[in-house]
């Protein structure tokens, strides 16, 4: 069970809600960068929320997520940062 392509600031409460269901399944979270998609122009716009990606991911892990990645506008450099910088992952 999990959350995909949500704004990063929404991920933690959504993970907590899923964890409260006690399904016994792994919780997956793949938030986007925090920008909004503009369907009229076909582009992502606005401020991203990637400067604090690792800190946010640690909160997602503590909330119960065990598979953490990124969706739209989250590049491989942020995923590499998660893998190399944090000691909280398993």
Image (spheres, rainbow, N blue to C red):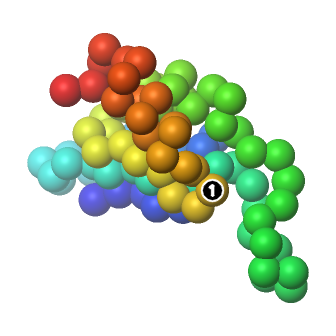
Residue 33 location, x and y as percent? Answer: 64, 49
Q: Nearer the viewer, residue 60 or 30?
A: 30
Q: Residue at x 20, y 48 (%)?
A: 26
- The residue singled out by tag 1 in the image is 73
Q: Nearer the viewer, residue 31 or 21?
A: 31
Secondary structure of the residue carrying tag 1 is loop
Write down the quadrant of residue 50 in the picture.
top right
Image quadrant where one finds the N terminus: bottom left
Horizontal relation, residue 25 to residue 21: left or right: left
Residue 20 seen from this side: no
Horizontal relation, residue 49 to residue 4: left or right: right
Residue 5 seen from this side: yes
| Vertical relation: 27 (above or below) 44 | above
Q: Residue at x 30, y 18 (%)?
A: 88
Residue 25 location, x and y as percent? Answer: 16, 52
Q: Residue at x 74, y 45 (%)?
A: 48
Image quadrant where one finds the C terminus: top left
Q: Residue furthest bottom?
A: 40
């Amino acid at each position: 069970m999990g959350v995909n392509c949500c704004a990063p600031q929404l991920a933690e409460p959504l993970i907590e809600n899923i964890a409260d269901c006690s399904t016994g399944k792994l919780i997956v979270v793949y938030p986007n960068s925090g920008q909004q998609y503009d369907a009229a122009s076909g582009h992502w716009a606005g401020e991203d929320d990637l400067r604090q990606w690792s800190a946010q991911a640690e909160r997602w892990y503590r909330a119960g997520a065990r598979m953490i990645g990124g969706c739209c506008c989250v590049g491989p450099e942020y995923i590499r940062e998660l893998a190399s910088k944090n000691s909280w992952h398993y």
